[in-house]
Amino acid sequence: MEPEPEPSQLTPEQAAEFERAYARAPIAVTRLSVKTGRFLAANDRAVELYGYSREELSRRTFLELTHPEDVARSKRVVTSLKEQTFDDVRGVEKRYVRSDGSTIWTVIHVTVIHDEQDAPLHYLTFTTDLTPIRRAEMLRGGSRRVLELVARGRPLSEALDATMALVREALPEAVCALYTVNNRRQVLEPVAWEGLDETEDAGLDPISLDSNECRLAVAVKESRSLVFGPDRPDGPIQDGCLEPFSRLGLGLLRFEPIRGPSGESVGALLVGRAGVEDPLAFDDLLDT
């Protein structure tokens, strides 16, 4: 990437201090080309937020990282800046797609930096991650929908469908499976799943509720949650019942019984994710 020019009014010591503050800022700070929108510089938080190295970012434009549904609005913002309708834009919410394919919600502030002739030199952007906030809002709305279905006495299948929809909306990168209790056969049957390919789907066999060796079966009978992962209460993802999920290299996996009106387990939801960088949102999702 191009080296960030030192402001002429700063001493070398002041400029070095400015560079350290820029690199370690708690929000993502980037410099973009006015002509192409390409990333010219990025601080540590921007690298972390977008999931690309500085070298990788330098080969991309901000529109290439923008969520497809937000590209048109982002282009309108750039047009306003190029036509000098505004010198800066504040508080614009938009989504980006990270290098791993996951979506993040952000709010951005963009300022136009001019040269000595007052011509636009580059854009300086400040980006704050709103993903935990937006996910929490979706969780609250989704959990209300599920509770309303239960309160109205709707069929269990509708509540389970709503639960899966909530998982897909709030954690689209998650791997999840939904089970129902078959009391006649005394098994936990998989009825829906997300994030598993056809080969992995074949490994989702019914789980016998008569087995005391499978912790999932015991948890259903006791209506007890299980949380697997590094430094988690139930340890690594190594239970034999979890073989289809342990092969995925997940960082976190939570098994949550679904209780009926009388408190008995009528099903279970199993949700996992590859990373552990956002455990709060992950736990909040299953707490609904």
Image: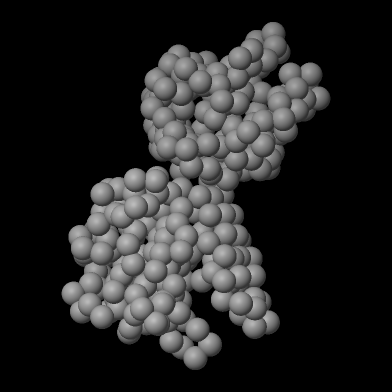
- Regarding residue 6, the answer to whether it shows in the image is no
**Residue 268 in the image: above or below residue 53:** below
Q: Quadrant of residue 240?
A: bottom left
Q: Quadrant of residue 243?
A: bottom left
The residue sitting at the top extreme is 117
- Regarding residue 250, the answer to whether it shows in the image is yes
The residue sitting at the bottom extreme is 262
Q: Identify the residue at horizontal 51%, vertical 33% (top origin).
A: 29
Q: Identify the residue at horizontal 47%, vertical 38% (top origin).
A: 101
Near-viewer residue (115 or 31): 31
Q: From the viewer's perspective, is 61 left or right of 222?
A: right
Q: From the viewer's perspective, is 235 left or right of 1?
A: left
**Residue 154 in the image: above or below residue 240:** below
**Residue 277 in the image: above or below residue 253:** above
**Residue 152 percent coordinates (x, y):** 68, 82
**Residue 191 percent coordinates (x, y):** 46, 64
**Residue 72 percent coordinates (x, y):** 72, 30
Near-viewer residue (234 or 28): 234
Q: Identify the residue at horizontal 39%, vertical 82% (top origin).
A: 184
Quarter occupied by the N terminus: top left
